[in-house]
Image (cartoon, rainbow, N blue to C red):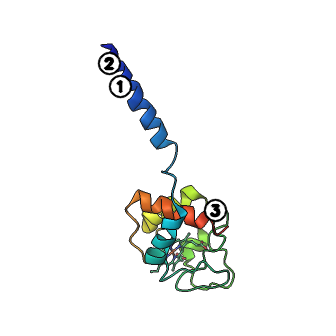
């Protein structure tokens, strides 16, 4: 193998490692806009304010279906033992029906990984 080839392989391997270490670090300010556009019809960031979906104030670190005064949870959501970490929310908003089959979140999913990272960065500000 020529020297140049092994160097570029190393660079490639490093890039792969970096990309599997997590999602890109999001931008909370952009995430606020994504939230307003994609989630805001159904979710509020204010404590105790539920819409079609439960308030997402403090959702990170919370157990699924834990908002007491929200009555719209599906049985599927109540049965899961998910705790909402960044990883779990990332998977859920990418494909809600895959993560919680039979769930009631009528949302097809956010395809853009950068937009998911941004909205998660925004949710981190709501702890
Ligand atoms: C069309 C309405 C709607 C949209 C749009 C929507 N959601 Fe939801 N969401 C819901 C409903 C309803 C539930 C409860 C689902 C269930 O119980 O199965 C829910 C549940 C959740 C939960 C779990 C909350 C808990 O207390 O366990 C998270 C996290 C969440 N949504 C995040 C988001 C994010 C982030 C977006 C935007 C990218 C979004 N949702 C868009 C309606 C919506």
Is 15 on the left or on the right of 124, as rendered?
Answer: left
Relative to 30, say whether 38 is above or below. below
Residue pointed to by mark 1: 8
Q: Which mark is residue 109?
A: none
Residues at marks 2 and 3 touching, judged by CB atoms closer than 8 Å: no
Q: Secondary structure at mark 3?
A: loop
Q: Where's residue 11, x and y in %? A: 40, 29
Q: Secondary structure at mark 1?
A: helix
Mark 3, mark 1: which one is toward the viewer? 1
Q: Residue at x 55, y 55 (%)?
A: 87
Q: Is residue 103 visible?
A: no
Q: Is residue 29 visible?
A: yes
Q: Residue at x 43, y 68 (%)?
A: 97
Q: Secondary structure at mark 2?
A: helix
User: In front: 92, or 74?
Assistant: 92
Is 83 on the left or on the right of 110, as rendered?
Answer: right
Q: Is mark 1 within 8 Å of ligand 1?
A: no
Which of marks 1 and 3 precedes in the sequence?
Answer: 1
Q: Where's residue 94, x and y in %? A: 43, 62
Within-10-Å neighbours for mark 2: few <14, some 14–19, many 20+: few
User: In front: 106, or 100?
Assistant: 106
Whole-angstrom CA distance, mark 3 to mark 1, is 40 Å
Q: Residue at x 48, y 51 (%)?
A: 24
Residues at marks 2 and 1 touching, judged by CB atoms closer than 8 Å: yes
Q: Quadrant of residue 77?
A: bottom right
Q: Where's residue 52, x and y in %? A: 52, 85
Q: Is mark 3 within 8 Å of ligand 1?
A: no
Q: Which mark is residue 4?
A: 2
């Amino acid at each position: 193998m020529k020297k140049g080839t092994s160097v570029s392989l190393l660079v490639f391997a490093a890039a792969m490692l970096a990309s599997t270490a997590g999602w890109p670090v999001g931008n909370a300010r952009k995430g606020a806009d994504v939230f307003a556009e994609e989630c805001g019809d159904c979710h509020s960031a204010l404590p105790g304010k539920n819409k079609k979906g439960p308030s997402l104030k403090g959702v990170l670190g919370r157990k699924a279906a834990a908002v007491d005064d929200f009555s719209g949870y599906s049985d599927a959501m109540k049965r899961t033992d998910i705790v909402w970490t960044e990883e779990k929310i990332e998977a859920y908003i990418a494909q809600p029906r895959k993560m919680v089959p039979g769930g009631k979140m009528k949302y097809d999913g956010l395809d853009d990984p950068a937009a998911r990272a941004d909205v998660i960065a925004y949710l981190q500000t709501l702890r």
